[in-house]
């Protein structure tokens, strides 16, 4: 290996086409040690976020208590019923999946002996099955063996509609077969490039068959183990008060060597985000605080104490604007924004382009979101291998005016542009949330200077995000011209994320507005690319398809990405944690330790 | 007397039913469901969310839901939390001890301040003591608890670093360390609530005592040559207590209901914080149970106050 090869490889890491771990492995193959390889990356500027720096895992245990603060405490501890991340995290403290997603978007084995791949025969050539080899010698906290039967049971449990589990979406369309006591095969109806859904990450936590087998279907709510979990993780359950306190103690028979480091785990819930940040970074009462939805100004001031730090993990969450394709003000067959209509003014590409030019994304990042909202031109931002380089964003009121002038939108006496009697007057809705209202104000002001009149509307979050059929203000109905919210991407694969713009997912009265294509955009090229990506087994071609989809929807300007929404948390400087935006906070809890 | 109590209890039934109808309707009209968080998560198909709603009976008409709730409640079944998937009574019972301890202690503190200070101030009206007590009382009940709470945290936890500001219901230590730690973590929430309540009650006790102190029987008692202490305790305070008892009795249900704001600030895992998180999560069975029990307690303590009147003032009769 010569210098050129090395430089090329580092370049690939920087672009995200090669994982850091892959790089380190290749270096090890030519005799370079892991720390040396990491150093190389750091020198070349391909270092990960500060929180991710690799420190050697201590060769001892007995680290005392790990105290974590959640401003919303876990309310239940069955991973198949966990509605929010707080409940999933609570469950993840005791239950484990076969594999977890690390921050670079690759899989890391937990209960699996290895990650299935083409090379080790885990992935079928036709993409229709994946075979997981389970780690041997893993024991549930009560001493029973963990086997393939448990995995099969979880599939049966979650796919049963009577159980009403939240995870059912990951299990109902697959078939799980026990090959031997330590091997399970997940079979798909069609070639499936994204095979790492069932048994992986937040949706893959496994519950023990021997304790749940009498409580499936409608009886699932009566299981005593719903509140007293018996899992396989590094910490054994000791106590749970819903919404308040969760406690665990080190599992001395854990299946990973030297782990866990801490003797006890305490997760305290309740309160508010700002005081949680204080309890970590100012008084040091706690080691880690989850989900810091706090103004960056305050976080910076707390960081200045030198006791704790803020961890920003870029993920797929994005705050974005939708410009309606349909006419929300006319009723067709008793339905507003019917898919047979088109929006009277937003259907003009020039208007959409002007609105995109009027969104000052840098200002949003600088003055509203800080590190919690980096400006972006893409809808699909992460993992980096799926990020498009083709999209650019610009803020220019002058240019927006030019575009509108050229398209024949003339200012009226009141300064508002109009063409053929149609005026550029829009209702812009979002949920009530301070940064969102500030964003609305910023965009409204800019639009005014380009002769566009925006009426802002803010809806209580519980209404906006509800599935209430009777309410006209839900975001899935989208009965306004413009709306803004955040959509999240819980997995390191964009397939589920990008179905938000396929034509068969349109949100209409017929499907009770449950379709995911809320902007009701229809583009044959996009549909074709999505269909192709669903069955494309070559990861490079598949990534190219997703990048194409991103470019199509973003350049249509029906969707204006504003800022990314990374996961932000706070921790003490002495705590070494392993975090991932693609998995739960506790996804790699077994690796957490304190500096010597 | 028994008759009176029975009659009052019977009257209470329709009013409690009315309260429950209003509560249930308002909650049913409120938008949202416990599964909001699933809405923006692309990994959850929307029909999963719909199935979850259906499995909890959220799609049934309001009146069917109300009657099934009512019959269950009459059988002593408080319902099943949508969010925690456990029985509501377990949730409430787990949090009751903390609430009783914290709010109970603060009410005792409030009484311990209000009674002596109020009586002292009233027996020496417009003295220096009265002026100071009055001013402090004004300040005390003018400052809202969320403000004083934050102020105390800022001073004692952050600047001085003496007291923890995260309350923990299950301290791991035992013996005297437990007592010490419990004291350290309770002192701020109890002081915030107790001083606020105490300030309001002080003003009330003072004016009640002032009303009595000018009456003829007090002058008579003094003229008989009774010692001042005896006059104050037996002739003034006992009579002055009647309005105070109503006030305190009506305050008692809050011992159960908890203090929403203060519990939130100090992370006290009491009924108040249970209620607020249930409201935020649209967990109707928990909200119903807490508010309904609260309503029952208000009705009950009203009755209790009326009964205590009879004991304090034999002239009041219930025949």
Image (tube, coloured by chain):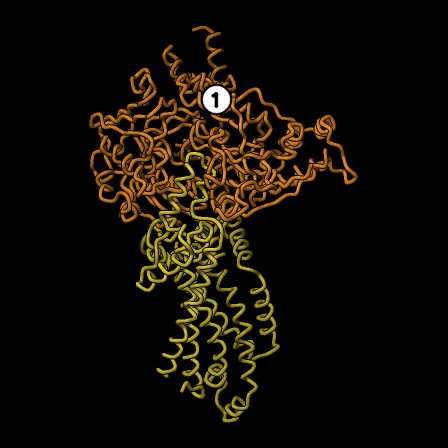
Chain colours: A orange, B yellow
The quarter of the picture where residue A596 lies is: top left
Q: Is residue A139 left or right of residue B205?
A: left
Query: Relative to A393, is A148 on the left or the right?
Result: left
Which residue: 52% across, 77% down?
B119
Q: Is residue A435 visible?
A: no
Coordinates of residue A380 in the picture (x, y in percent): 51, 27
Q: Quadrant of residue B175?
A: bottom left
Mark 1 belongs to which subunit? A
Up-down relation of residue A543 to residue A360 (above or below): above
Residue count near mark 1 (Cα–Cα under 10 Å), binned few <14, some 14–19, many ≥20: some
> Considering the image in quadrants, where does the N terminus of chain A appear?
top left
- Front residue of B47/B99: it is B47
Q: Position of residue B69 (x, y in %)?
A: 36, 59
Q: Which residue is mark 1?
A: A528
Height in image: B312 above or below B195? below
Viewer-side residue, A345 vs A44: A345
Q: Secondary structure at mark 1?
A: helix
Q: What percent of the width, then of the height, locates residue A570?
A: 48, 38
Which residue is situated farthest in the top direction here?
A2
Residue A154 found in image quarter: top left
């Amino acid at each position: 290996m010569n210098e050129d090869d090395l430089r090329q490889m580092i370049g690939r890491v920087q672009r995200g086409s090669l994982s850091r771990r892959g790089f380190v492995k290749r270096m090890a193959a030519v005799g370079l040690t892991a720390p040396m390889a990491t150093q190389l990356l750091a020198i070349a500027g391909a270092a990960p976020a500060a929180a991710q720096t690799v420190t050697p895992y201590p060769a001892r245990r007995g680290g005392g208590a790990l105290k974590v603060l959640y401003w919303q405490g876990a309310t239940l501890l069955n991973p198949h019923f966990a509605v929010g991340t707080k409940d999933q995290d609570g469950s993840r403290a005791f239950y484990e999946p076969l594999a977890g997603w690390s921050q670079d978007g690759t899989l890391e084995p937990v209960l699996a002996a290895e990650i299935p791949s083409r090379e080790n025969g885990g992935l079928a050539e036709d993409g229709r099955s994946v075979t997981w080899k389970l780690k041997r010698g893993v024991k549930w906290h009560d001493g029973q063996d963990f086997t393939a039967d448990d995995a099969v049971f979880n599939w049966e449990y979650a796919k049963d509609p009577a159980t009403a589990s939240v995870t059912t979406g990951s299990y109902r369309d697959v078939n799980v077969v026990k090959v031997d006591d330590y091997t399970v095969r997940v079979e798909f109806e069609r070639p499936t490039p994204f095979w790492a859904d069932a048994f992986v990450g937040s949706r893959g936590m496994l519950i023990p068959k021997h304790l749940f087998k009498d409580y499936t279907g409608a009886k699932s709510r009566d299981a005593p183990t719903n509140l007293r979990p018996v899992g396989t993780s590094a910490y054994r359950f000791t106590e749970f008060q819903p919404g308040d306190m969760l406690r665990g103690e080190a599992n001395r028979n854990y299946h990973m060597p030297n782990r866990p480091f801490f003797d006890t785990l305490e997760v305290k819930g309740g309160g508010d985000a700002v005081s949680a940040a204080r309890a970590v970074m100012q008084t040091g009462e706690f080691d880690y605080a989850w989900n810091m939805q706090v103004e960056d100004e305050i976080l910076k001031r707390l960081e200045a104490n030198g006791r704790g730090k803020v961890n920003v993990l870029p993920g797929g969450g994005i705050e974005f604007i939708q410009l309606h394709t349909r006419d929300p003000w006319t009723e067709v067959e008793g339905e507003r924004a019917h898919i047979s209509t088109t929006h009277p003014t937003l259907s003009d590409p020039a208007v959409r382009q002007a609105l995109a030019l009027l969104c000052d994304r840098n200002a949003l990042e600088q003055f509203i979101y800080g590190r919690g909202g980096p400006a972006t031109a893409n809808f699909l931002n992460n993992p980096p291998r799926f990020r498009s380089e083709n999209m650019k964003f610009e803020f220019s009121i002058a240019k927006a005016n030019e575009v509108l002038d050229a398209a024949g939108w003339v200012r009226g006496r009141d300064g508002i542009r109009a063409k053929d009697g149609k005026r550029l007057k829009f209702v812009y809705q979002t949920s009530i949330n301070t940064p969102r209202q500030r964003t609305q104000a910023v965009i409204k002001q800019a639009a005014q200077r380009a002769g566009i009149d925006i009426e802002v509307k803010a809806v209580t979050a519980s209404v906006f995000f509800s599935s209430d059929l009777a309410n006209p203000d839900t975001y899935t109905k989208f009965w306004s011209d413009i709306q803004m919210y955040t959509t999240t991407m819980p997995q390191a694969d964009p397939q589920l994320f990008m179905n938000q713009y396929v034509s068969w997912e349109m949100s209409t009265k017929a499907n009770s507005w449950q379709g995911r294509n809320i902007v009701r955009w229809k583009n044959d090229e996009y549909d074709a690319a999505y269909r192709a990506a669903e069955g494309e087994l070559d990861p490079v071609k598949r990534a190219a398809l997703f990048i194409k989809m991103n470019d199509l929807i973003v350049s249509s300007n029906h969707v204006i990405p504003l800022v990314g929404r990374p996961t932000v948390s706070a921790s003490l400087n002495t705590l070494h944690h392993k975090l991932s935006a693609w998995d739960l906070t506790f996804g790699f809890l077994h690796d957490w330790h304190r500096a010597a | 007397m028994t008759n009176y109590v029975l009659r009052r209890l019977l009257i209470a039934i329709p009013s409690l039913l009315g309260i429950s109808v209003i509560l249930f309707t308002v909650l049913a009209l409120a938008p949202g469901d416990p599964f909001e968080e699933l809405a923006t998560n692309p990994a959850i198909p929307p029909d999963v969310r719909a199935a979850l709603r259906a499995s909890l009976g959220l799609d049934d008409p309001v009146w069917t839901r109300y009657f099934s709730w009512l019959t269950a409640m009459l059988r002593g079944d408080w319902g099943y939390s949508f969010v925690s998937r456990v029985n509501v009574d377990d949730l409430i019972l787990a949090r009751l001890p903390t609430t009783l301890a914290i709010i109970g202690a603060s009410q005792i503190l409030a009484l311990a301040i209000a009674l002596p200070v109020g009586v002292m101030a009233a027996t020496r009206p417009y003295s220096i003591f009265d002026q100071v007590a009055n001013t402090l009382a004004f300040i005390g009940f003018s400052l809202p608890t969320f403000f004083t709470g934050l102020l105390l945290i800022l001073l004692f936890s952050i600047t001085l670093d003496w007291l923890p500001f995260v309350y923990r219901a299950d301290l791991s230590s035992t013996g005297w360390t437990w007592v010490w730690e419990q004291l350290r973590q309770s002192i701020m929430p109890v002081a915030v609530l107790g001083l606020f309540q105490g300030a309001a009650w002080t003003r009330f006790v003072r004016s009640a005592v002032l009303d009595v102190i000018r009456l003829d029987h007090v002058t008579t008692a003094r003229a008989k040559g009774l010692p001042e202490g005896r006059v104050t305790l037996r002739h003034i305070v006992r009579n002055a207590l009647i309005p105070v008892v109503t006030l305190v009795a009506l305050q008692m249900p809050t011992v159960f209901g908890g203090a929403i704001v203060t519990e939130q600030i100090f992370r006290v895992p009491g009924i108040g914080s249970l209620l607020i998180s249930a409201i935020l999560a649209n967990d109707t069975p928990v909200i119903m149970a807490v508010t309904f029990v609260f309503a029952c307690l208000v009705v009950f303590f009203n009755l209790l106050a009326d009964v205590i009147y009879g004991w304090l003032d034999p002239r009041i009769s219930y025949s």
